[in-house]
Image (tube, grey):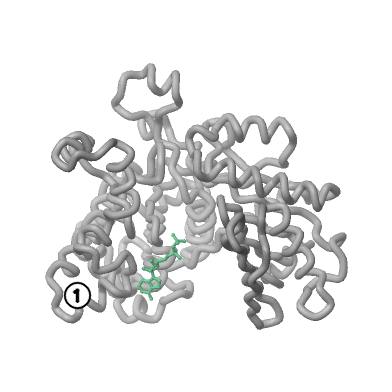
Amino acid sequence: MNILVVNCGSSSLKFQLIDSDTEQVSASGNCERIGLDGMITYKAHGEKFVTETDLPEHGIAIKKVLELLVDKERGVISSLDEIHAVGHRMVHGGEKFSSSVIITEDVIKDIESCNDLAPLHNPANILGVRACQEVMPGVKHVAVFDTAFHQTMPAKAYLYALPKEYYEKYGVRRYGFHGTSHSFVSKETIKFADLDPKTAKVIVCHLGNGASISASIGGKCVDTSMGLTPLEGLIMGTRSGDLDPAIIEYLCNHENLTVSEMLNILNKKSGVLGMSGGISSDFRDLNAAANEGNEVAKVTLEAYAYRVAKYIGSYTAAMNGVDAITFTAGVGENAAWLRPMVCKYLGFLGVELDEAASEKACGVEGIISTPESKVKLCVIPTNEELAIARETLALVK
Ligand code: ADP
């Protein structure tokens, strides 16, 4: 079966056509600058093409993608009938969706009722669904939510210590994000580290540009670091993660900023970019600067690793133990130098990093703990598109 995976942003539409039998990607790409000038990057048959083309709206973008997929030279299928289902990435399913669903009009209404919680993302995701439904009315469309995996969290983990009316009136609670990745990587960890799928206690560190960490028991999420929005938790590329909420008023007063301006700073100008005094949000640049002796870069990376280690410690307490800790996403998969910086705090758990194995496991799966380590350490590359394709297949089969 061919599954088209679509991830629609406000001005972009990323796609992959995945053969569910082999789990191989036959074509992939990205439509960018939708509503502006328009550009399509398309990869198939080991080649990459970039075309500048008018993309006034998402409907046109998806039509052009489908034309490319069936194109005589560049295409990978001979007709659209060969696309059996479409899996759509959805950012926020609120408390309404604890798993993926086949999209109906009622489902769209329910997703729209969560728009308030993700005003930048959900409307764009729905736009993508509408555009695809129009050109592919005969196939099933499936919604796969970033928040769904975390819906198994108990109330003690998702409630904030705020007056309870705010949860009741507005749904203010921890939702968590990157759920498709956490779900995929925690399941892969159980297989790869040969753990008991019913009882395994797994911590997944999804360290990318955005970063979050999850704790799961037997494949069910019990806690995660992102909250009502993806701002809470770890230090990220440009996001602050946890801080004293009173800082917001303090800085608004001193810098004469509005709350939205402050939130923009916390989302876009903080994290390792802000802490390092603007060196970079990219961990390769920060590591290079630290290696050249830049003290600010060094302390930024130390603070980053320290925050990850503190979350691992607290989630180990939350689960009363941990069987495996997995690193994933851009930084987690590739930055071998970061792993000793995190693991040096975890000796009390019997964690022993095998540095040579860790150096080898860059962008590929690997067990990076010593045979004596009491906790298995793993690197598992995340693959959100494949996870969406698997979820879609399971619903349409
Ligand atoms: P997102 O999907 O959130 O945009 P990714 O998971 O693709 O993020 O991660 C992107 C980040 O991964 C980049 O900001 C970069 O800092 C980091 N990264 C990629 N390759 C490396 C590497 N070899 N070493 C260190 N960091 C890397």
In this image, 305 relative to 16: left or right?
Answer: left
Do we see residue 370 in this rendering? no
In-front residue for pair 13/44: 13
Q: Which corner quadrant holds the N terminus? A: bottom right
Viewer can see residue 222: yes
Residue 191 horizontal side relative to residue 362, left or right: right
Residue of label 1: 290
Q: Position of residue 331 (x, y in %)?
A: 37, 67
Closer to the camera in the image, 394 or 219: 394
Location of residue 243 in the rendering, given as x and y in whole percent from the top left corner: 23, 43
Rendered view: 140 above or below 271: above
Mark 1 residue element: helix
| Residue 132 placement (x, y as % from top left) | 74, 51
Quadrant of the displayed image that contains ligand 1: bottom left
Q: Residue at x 25, y 78 (%)?
A: 288
Choose top left, top right, bottom left or bottom right for residue 109. Answer: top right
Q: Residue at x 38, y 40 (%)?
A: 227
Three-letter code for the amino acid on which mark 1 is drawn: Ala
* Residue at (49% x, 67% y) in the render: 381
Q: Is residue 79 left or right of residue 386?
A: right
